[in-house]
Amino acid sequence: MGKQTSFFSDETRTEMEKIPEPMLILRLQPDKIYCEAVTDKLLEFLQIDRERVEAFFADEENIPEEGGWMHPDDRRRIDHLFAGMKNFTDQKYVYRVRLRRTKDIDYRWYPAVIYGRSLGEEGILVYCTLPEAETIGERRRQNASAEKMRKLLVNKVLETTQDCIFWKDTDRRFVGVNRAFLDFYGFPSDEVLIGKTDEEMGWHREPEQFRRDEERVLRGESTLLVHGKCRIRGEERDILATKAPIYDGDAIIGLVGSFIDVTEDYNQRKQIERLGDELKDALQAEKKTNENLNMFMSRMSHEMRTPMNAVIGLSSLGMKAKDVDEAVDCLHKINMSGQYLLGIINDVLDIGKIDSGKFRLSEKRTRLSDINTAADTIIRPIADRKKVRVAYDFSGVQIPEVICDRMRVQQILINLMNNAVKFTDEGGTVRVEFSDQAANGKVKLKIVVSDNGCGMSPDFLKKIFQPFIQENRDPSRYGSGTGLGLSISKTLAEQMGGGITVSSEEGVGSVFTVTLMLGLPKEDTPEKGAAGGSGGRSRVSRDGSGEYDYSVLKGKRILLAEDNEINREIALRMMSRAGITADCAGNGREAVEMAEKSSPGYYAAVILDLMMPTMGGYEAAERIRSSKREDLKRIPMIAMSGDIFEESVNRAISCGMNSFITKPLDAEKLFATLIETINPL
């Protein structure tokens, strides 16, 4: 290439290079192309120096195939354009060329404006400008900055979101995951899972569901908050997963998904549902209890009013009776009605103690024959009136004495026998069989009470031991009751380590089987217990007649503290029958004063009602025991109350009393307790 002769002076060229526009000025000669000027703006855009631009057009025979700032194909196209411009110098051409800046890897298309001016013999002057070069460059810088910001933002979102995010290829193999995903599974990096499927990781107990979901997503569907189970470090968790396909144009190239751990939410929801069910059950139970209570109150009203009406009516008739025998008959019936009313009250008190958890067994050495005798004494008159035969079988008994709560075993037996007699018609039979066997230091006692009465329906058998439940039977034929006896008996049997079962058929009869685990007495264990007494007192021997010898009470003087006038009169009359003299106090304070004023040995015993005005029996007993007189510190004291709960008995004993008797008073029990308290063996 020969030395170029510039068309412009050096001063003009220098000024032209300062033009604030990307511009290249060429001068076309028939055999040469001269670069007259290159603006600084174009050099800045292309990021090259002026010499490279000038050299690019100097040798048109050796166009570089690569590495130049203009694509070689476009360089040839421009030469062809320049060749035709000599006849069209006044026309402006908009041309697209591929340029590559120094920092770019690839060529990019740019619009170029080309126009010429004829110089006559000097050739053609060609102006080439890139009008959008600056705008495009700025836009590229902005786009690059925005792309960088977008990537940073996406990475920041992926790394800081609490949702576990992952993306997979079309083979359902992991391509990437976010930080929350790694933390959820406890992975230090994604190297342990990239290229693997869920099945290969062994996360799901039922992987088929997850596989089907992802295959649907790869067919173009999306899933939203699908529930599933996932195993993490040996623990199964509840998750909700959302997945969507990833597109490249119209083609699906993978899927992206996210999931959240909802185990606590699900557990909380289950707990709420469980509590709701429990509340619903409790409400139903409360409703049932209220229905039973209403039914119970209705039945109690009838059951208690019936004997009470008898007591009031017979009392009125007795007071008007002119014949002694008629009056005695009224008194006898009043006593029977009172005993029946007392039985109802005792049933209600028993069920109350059992429900409140205050029930305790009082176990002592007892003969089975005594238990049976006591039950027979109560049931035999009822059976005789109905003309029902009662038979006993002791052939299976090998151990005649046991350790048990005698009163409670009697209560079970009496309840079952009473029901058997009640629901057996005239001429029927009630059979009671006893058998036992020793087992692991205990006595397994079995009592079978059977009858050939009216029997029970299968539906009623399912609820026979529920409180207040009774089958509809003709009360004029079979009587009525509280519906508490069997419930109490079953609970008592269970307290003694056994239970009660029943089989029955309507019109054929019923069979109740009781099993009790009782104590096995040692051969050298002395007989314990006292009729109506407490505190470990030994029982008084009987004189062979089966009755207590009450003559020992004759001439004794008793201090009686009772605020109720009628109860006081009843107690005085009972004691007078045995030759006992009694002094009465209206409350505990009077009793303490009378005891303090009496001479030593004047009173053989003190009977204190627990509930009295001014001062009750508890405090009065403590005052007497704290006296300075030695005889009062040892004087026998007996508690008397209609409150038969264990707490009251224990409190009375702790206050210094020796024994406890219950109201309404029973003369036999009163005399037996006085004998055992005044003259203990």
Image (cartoon, rainbow, N blue to C red):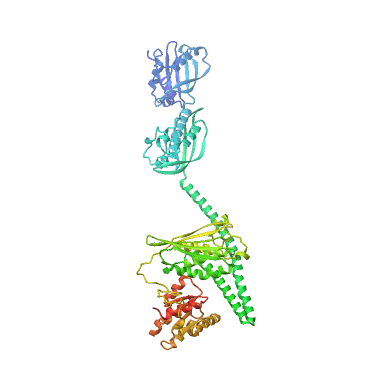
User: Percent from the top left, x then y, of residue 522?
Assistant: 36, 67
Q: Is residue 446 placed above or below 571 in the rendered structure?
A: above
Q: Considering the image in quadrants, where does the N terminus appear?
A: top left
Q: How many marks?
A: 0
The x and y percentages for residue 140 are 46, 30
> What is the quadrant of the C terminus in the image?
bottom left
- Residue 531 percent location from the top left of the image: 45, 74
Residue 458 lies, in percent from the top left, at 56, 55
- Can residue 585 be seen here? no
Q: Is residue 614 above or below residue 78?
A: below
User: Which quadrant would residue 47 be assigned to in this image?
Assistant: top left
Tell which of 162 and 186 is nearer to you: 186
Look at 42% across and 34% down and name the residue there: 197
- Write down the quadrant of residue 402 in the picture: bottom left
State left or right for residue 197 relative to residue 666.
left
Say whether residue 499 is visible: yes
Q: Between residue 39 and residue 294, name the one nearer to us.
A: 294
Foreground of the two, 28 or 639: 639
Q: Does residue 422 lie above or below 191 as drawn?
A: below
Identify the residue at image location x=42%, y=41%: 231
Q: Residue furthest left?
A: 524
